[in-house]
Amino acid sequence: MKKIKVFILLALALAAVSCSEEDLDSKSIFDTSSPERNAFETWILNNYTEPYNIDLKYRFEDIESDMKYNVTPAAYDKSVALAKLVKYLWIEAYEELVGQEFVATYCPKVLHFVGSPEYEKSGGSMVLGTAEGGLKITLFNVNGLNPENPDAEILNEWYFKTMHHEFAHILHQTKNYSTDFNTISAGKYTGPGWMNITDQEARQMGFVSNYASTETQEDFVETIAIYVTYTKAQWQNILNEAGEAGAAIILQKFEMVKEYLAESWGIDIDMLHNIVQEREENIGDLDLGTF
């Protein structure tokens, strides 16, 4: 046993000497150089990555897209405009209400722009946006944006209702809402059949939109997204279309949504609505092209 121990100690000593005498290559096997950035990418670094830990991807990377669909890259100028609009109308709206730390902590870490729409093969419905595990939101039809005339209603339909919708998914997946919400319209959800009913028909059933009738979670987040992005007149029109019975159900759901956001996240949905609406009124003053 003593001889074995001596041999082991001698081997370790020789190994230590050989390691200390070996010249290590000073070059790293990893690329440690800073990437070259254009003006937009430098702006992204300063306005998304550093303050909010968000990686905004506008260059086409096929690995970021669903290979089942044929989509096109987002145009540079349209990406610039949408990035500025997202920061002003979405990120800074939440930051104004609940602070930068909230945004940096809970916002998705990747924001992905795709130039064209994405269409479902079954039924042909258009995908406005997707969220993946609370980490990434993809916005489609970026090339449909008109930077010269950014109409708030069109922006909401294509991008910002989707942003609030998908972010609401992230919030409830982090802190779940009361299961009592699921009982309000139990037995009335349509699943894939939502495409076969109109918004007005859905509202008379107690849903804010036909897509909200898909299932409970979509119902929950659609209520948030539509209330925040719609004007007071548009929200009232939803209640009018719903009729007395449908409106009562929608308002019951809204009160549960409002309570959830306040108690779980410290978000006053009425204040968020007012902030978003005020910012939308000022989008004509934004410089969406230069840095």
Image: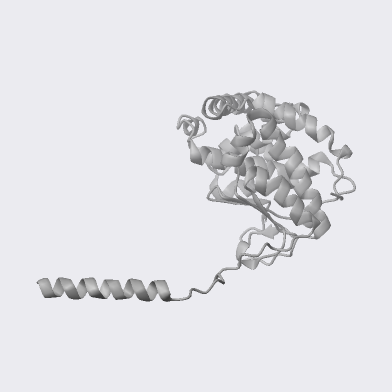
Relative horizontal placement of residue 184, taking residue 149 as reference (left or right) = left
Vertical placement of 73 versus 201: above or below?
Answer: below
Residue under the point 27% across and 72% down: 12
Relative horizontal placement of residue 1, taking residue 210 as reference (left or right) = left
Asked which quadrant contains residue 29, the reply is bottom right
Residue 211 visible in the picture: no
Vertical placement of 248 versus 118: above or below?
Answer: above
Q: Quadrant of the N terminus?
A: bottom left
Render colour scheme: one colour
Q: Position of residue 99 (x, y in %)?
A: 64, 31
Toward the viewer: 179 or 155?
Answer: 155
Q: Position of residue 260 (x, y in %)?
A: 53, 28
Vertical placement of 199 versus 74: above or below?
Answer: above
Vertical placement of 134 versus 246: above or below?
Answer: below
Toward the viewer: 198 or 45?
Answer: 45
Q: Position of residue 63 (x, y in %)?
A: 60, 66
The residue sitting at the left extreme is 1
Q: Position of residue 213 (x, y in %)?
A: 58, 40
Relative horizontal placement of residue 81, taking residue 242 as reference (left or right) = right
Residue 7 visible in the picture: yes
Residue under the point 67% across and 62% down: 34
Q: How many marks?
A: 0
